[in-house]
Image (spheres, rainbow, N blue to C red):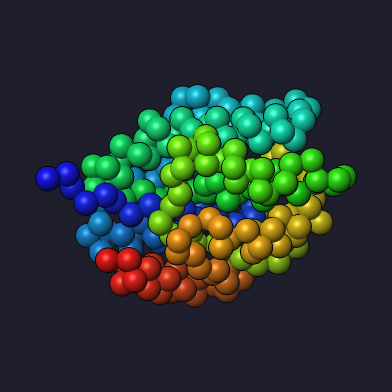
Amino acid sequence: MPPKPGHFIAVDGIDGVGKSTQIQGLERLMGELDLEFLTTRDPGSSEIGRRLRTLLLESRLTMHRRTEAMLFMASRCEMVETTIRPTLASGTSVISDRFLLANVVYQSVCEGPTEVSPDLLWQMGDLANGGLRPDLTLLLDMPAEQAMRRIEGPTDRMESRGAEYMESVRQSFLTELPRASRFTAVIDAAGSPEQVQAEIRKAVENYLSAST
Ligand SMILES: Nc1ncnc2c1ncn2[C@@H]1O[C@H](COP(=O)(O)OP(=O)(O)O)[C@@H](O)[C@H]1O
Ligand SMILES: Cc1cn([C@H]2C[C@H](O)[C@@H](COP(=O)(O)OP(=O)(O)O)O2)c(=O)[nH]c1=O
């Protein structure tokens, strides 16, 4: 009898919203719930993914928006097929720091006319991921201006596009969230780390009671 598949939880939101901080809290919660888990990072979590991450985030190479989108998709395909899918099949849960929803919103928000629509990115993403979607998506939400004030150090390709772009990305996260997975939750990320963690705990407990 194959083991019951693990839970697939994605955590997303604009830069500086507190994802990395809250994923540490979520890992503690999974431990308390006695759920085996693995944490992955998108883009990344494979050799190809790590090299694509460097190319996408740290280089200042100019590229067409569709090129940018497809490179994130390629990284995710590798992460899904080499890491996420086998982990879930073994009965271990996965917490992913971002997933396809980020690709849909960050690459469809453009300064000029939108070259790549969210619909096209959802289709590309399902093709790249063999249709795999998270069971639960936790969207950490707060005004971009406030989140960007939290960012220290050098900005990456997306952060350097500025607060107006990031606020448009934030609004697109809220619009596109319902398509990301069967269960979703918007988490108010503007409070203290403890307040945000409490909201996440409630959302995870609601998901577990509704899904099992
Ligand atoms: N609830 C919070 N209130 C104030 N500062 C926070 C909060 N959560 C995280 N931070 C700080 O904001 C910065 C970005 O947090 P981080 O978890 O790295 O965000 P992300 O991974 O979404 O970019 C870090 O310096 C972190 O300590
Ligand atoms: C997964 C993904 C991320 N991104 C962006 C979001 C972030 O600005 C950046 C990833 O950085 P991020 O996940 O925030 O890592 P760090 O905490 O090191 O900044 O890439 C996309 O534009 N498309 C994608 O498909």
Residue name at image x 56 percent, y 63 percent: 178
Residue 77 image offset from top left, x and y in percent: 49, 33
Residue 173 image offset from top left, x and y in percent: 64, 59
Is residue 124 found left or right of 78 in the rendered image?
A: right
Residue name at image x 66 percent, y 43 percent: 120
Q: Quadrant of the C terminus?
A: bottom left
Quarter assignment of residue 60: top right
Q: Quadrant of the N terminus?
A: top left
Quarter assignment of residue 28: bottom left
Above or below, 66 against 98 in this view is: above
Query: In the current view of this chain or complex, which residue is farthest to the right?
Result: 112
- Can residue 45 be seen in this snapshot? no
- Can residue 4 be seen in this snapshot? yes
Residue 117 image offset from top left, x and y in percent: 72, 46
For the residue pair 125 and 190, the one nearer the viewer reads as 125
Residue name at image x 62 percent, y 30 percent: 71
For the residue pair 77 and 194, the one nearer the viewer reads as 77
Above or below, 107 against 33 in this view is: above
| Circle count | 0
Is residue 96 found left or right of 178 in the rendered image?
A: left
Above or below, 104 against 82 in this view is: below
Is residue 191 found left or right of 97 in the rendered image?
A: right
Quarter assignment of residue 23: bottom left
For the residue pair 180 and 188, the one nearer the viewer reads as 180
Residue name at image x 60 percent, y 57 percent: 13
